Amino acid sequence: MRVQNATRLALTLLFAAGLGVSAVSTHAQSASQNKTATSASKSKSHKKKSAKQPSRWEKGQKVPTPARISEIQLALAKDGSFTGAPNGKWDDSTVEAMRKFQDAHGLNPSGKLDAKTLQQLGLGSSTAGLGAPMPPTSSTSATVKPAETARRQQ
């Protein structure tokens, strides 16, 4: 009889302890959800995004760094479109030099950076702006021999 009472008491204590832990974890979970909701509403009220890690993919063109702008200004100066010392600022003289360069090279003279202009300046990718991106090739299609490809097309 004593063993049964001791067992019941132990089970009751374990059950009560389990409820206590469950209540604490539920409280902690709701507190963290409230904190997340509060920080999300605060971040929405502030228009500036964190520069460390964006929460999602942001659309639109990013602003070039001052070092990149100086590099572009140097390339425009080599062409003779930009006069003055590179200052790392995208100012009116840089926009005008970009328009001049784009017009001289048969590009859309918008004064804005684009892939074709960077490529023409020698600062972009060799394939940028030339066409749609190619789908990735799988490892099996890359290892197919030309003779096998000819047989498949027949």
Image (cartoon, helix red, strand yellow):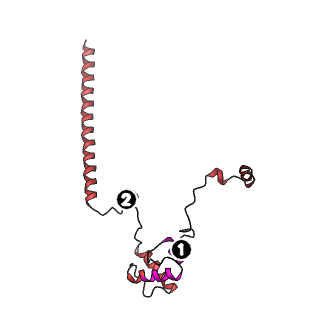
CB under 8 Å between callouts 2 and 1?
no
| Residue 57 drawn in magenta | no
User: Which residue lies under the disc numbered 1?
Assistant: 119
Question: Does residue 79 appear to the left or right of 88 in the view shown?
Answer: right
Above/below status of 146 relative to 128: above
Camera-side residue of 109 and 56? 109
Above/below status of 73 relative to 128: below
Answer with mark 2 or mark 1, whichever residue precedes in sequence: 2
**Looking at the rendered structure, which numbered label has been put on residue 107?**
none
- Separation of residues labelled 2 and 1 (CA atoms): 28 Å
Q: Which residues are magenta?
A: 96-125
Camera-side residue of 75 and 114? 114
User: Which residue lies under the disc numbered 2?
Assistant: 54
Query: Total label count?
Result: 2
Q: Position of residue 53 (x, y in %)?
A: 37, 59
Residue at x 26%, y 54% (from the top left corner): 41
Residue at x 25%, y 23% (from the top left corner): 12
Question: Does residue 107 appear to the left or right of 16 in the view shown?
Answer: right
Camera-side residue of 124 and 97? 97
Callout 2, which amino acid? Pro
Callout 1, which amino acid? Gln
Question: Does residue 120 appear to the left or right of 95 in the view shown?
Answer: right
Q: Position of residue 47 (x, y in %)?
A: 29, 63
Q: Nearer the viewer, mark 2 or mark 1?
A: 1
Above/below status of 12 relative to 131: above
Q: Position of residue 35 (x, y in %)?
A: 25, 49
Task: Identify the secondary structure beneath mark 1.
Answer: helix
Q: Position of residue 60 (x, y in %)?
A: 41, 65
Dot 1: within a 10 Å radius of its alpha carbon, few (fewer than 14), some, or many (20 or more) residues? some
| Residue 112 drawn in magenta | yes
